[in-house]
Amino acid sequence: MKFEAKLFLFPTPFFVFIGIVYALWSGWEPVGSTALLLTAGLTGMIGFYLWLVGRRIDPRPEDDAFGEIEEGAGDLGVYSPGSWWPIAIAAAGAICFLGLAVGWWLFYIGSALTVITLVGWVYEFSRGQHAH
């Protein structure tokens, strides 16, 4: 995780510097200045999170310069064998984007459907035969 944290933390000061220079040069133009400073904030947040996670977990095989491929063998996580919820979320998201073109009333319906399908996907294994 150290490489991933550095990948996001190193550009953060660059975006801060460029955001300030752009803001001063453009007379604090709101869109570009905000976008550059928010980019700095987002890369900083992601890098900080990855740095914290990297401190809590053991080094991974891909973090070892002399690591072998077989060191990474084994289970990588728990995945659903067959879930229909991602398709439902994609359909609800498509309704949201269609609502941006057609009208806000359709966007609100798509947003409600997105929340319902996201809750269904998150709690998929908390009911029925899969309940913990």
Image (cartoon, grey):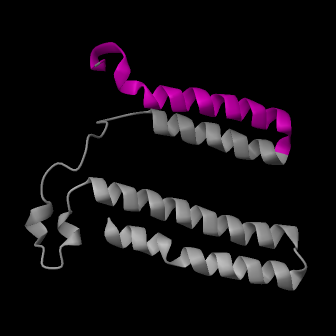
Indicate yes or no whether the magenta region holds residue 124: yes
Provide the residue span drawn in magenta: 102-131
Question: Residue 84: percent from the left, percent from the top?
Answer: 43, 33
Question: Residue 94: percent from the left, percent from the top?
Answer: 65, 44
For the C terminus, give its image quadrant. top left
What residue is drawn where x is 86% and y is 68%?
30
Residue 62, relative to residue 66: is it above or below? Answer: above
**Residue 95 appears left or right of 11:** right
Residue 1, relative to residue 104: is it above or below? Answer: below
Question: Residue 57: percent from the left, percent from the top?
Answer: 25, 54
Number of numbered markers: 0
Indicate yes or no whether the magenta region holds residue 104: yes
Q: Going by the picture, which residue comes out furthest to the right? A: 27
The residue nearer to you, when weighing 30 against 79, is 30
What residue is drawn where x is 17% and y is 66%?
61
The residue nearer to you, when weighing 41 against 105, is 41
Residue 103, relative to residue 16: is it above or below? Answer: above
What residue is drawn where x is 62% and y is 34%?
114
What residue is drawn where x is 58% and y is 26%?
116
Examine the residues drawn in magenta and state their main secondary structure.
helix
**Residue 51 appears left or right of 86:** left
**Residue 97 appears left or right of 121:** right
Q: Going by the picture, which residue comes out furthest to the top? A: 128
For the N terminus, give its image quadrant. bottom left
